[in-house]
Image (cartoon, rainbow, N blue to C red):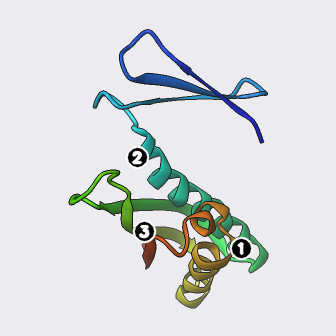
Amino acid sequence: MKLIVNNLSNHLEYSVKKENGAEIILNANGKGISPMDGLLGCVAACSAVDIELILEKMRQKLETLTVEAKGKRADDQTPKFFRKMHLEFKLSGDIKKSAAEKAVRLAVEKYCSVASSLKPDIDISWNVTIE
């Protein structure tokens, strides 16, 4: 894996590019997604991908999946790293509650590479709702 990060003309704004040309913009000027927002979002997105794949293998019919991610950062020191993250998964479709809970547990606690990279330093909790 290789990424290239370049500063842009806007103050505290950076382009993050993959070798294939895919790009995201991160900034620390309050106008967009900050690197810390990105990290929290990556835990949520990584978990969501794994949940979708697990539910597919379980033959559950997922229609929509939304993740609300919240993070609690250390505010008493610098750097202000994440202490806790909470992921609220909202799924819809023809899905059994027990299957959804198992898929989320496996994704967050076992398969999500981003979440696993942060353990054991960050407490990651989760909840599931079927709509």
Q: Quadrant of the C terminus?
A: bottom left
Residue 16: x percent and y percent?
Answer: 59, 29
Q: Secondary structure at mark 3?
A: strand
Q: CA distance from mark 3 to mark 2?
A: 14 Å
Q: Quadrant of the N terminus?
A: top right
Q: Amino acid at mark 2?
A: Asp
Q: CA distance from mark 3 to mark 1?
A: 17 Å
In the rendered image of this protein, does residue 47 appear above or below residue 41? below
Q: Residues within 10 Å of mark 3 (few under 14, many from 20)?
A: many
Residue 6: x percent and y percent?
Answer: 57, 20
Q: Nearer the viewer, mark 3 or mark 2?
A: 2
Residue 98: x percent and y percent?
Answer: 57, 90
Tell me which residue sits at (55%, 65%) in the image.
Answer: 118
In the rendered image of this protein, does residue 104 appear above or below residue 41? below
Furthest residue toward bottom? 98
Q: CA distance from mark 1 to mark 2?
A: 26 Å
Q: Secondary structure at mark 2?
A: helix
Residue 50: x percent and y percent?
Answer: 67, 66
Q: Which residue is mark 2?
A: 37
Q: How many numbered marks does the figure carry?
A: 3
Q: Which mark is residue 84?
A: none
Q: Residues within 10 Å of mark 2 (few under 14, many from 20)?
A: some
Q: Tell me where residue 57 sits by quadrant.
A: bottom right
Q: Which residue is mark 1?
A: 54
Tell me which residue sits at (43%, 75%) in the image.
Answer: 123
Tell me which residue sits at (34%, 61%) in the image.
Answer: 70
Q: Amino acid at mark 3?
A: Leu
* Mark found first going from the N terminus, 3 or 2: 2
- In the displayed structure, does residue 74 sit left or right of residue 128? left
Q: Amino acid at mark 1?
A: Ile
Q: Which residue is mark 3?
A: 87
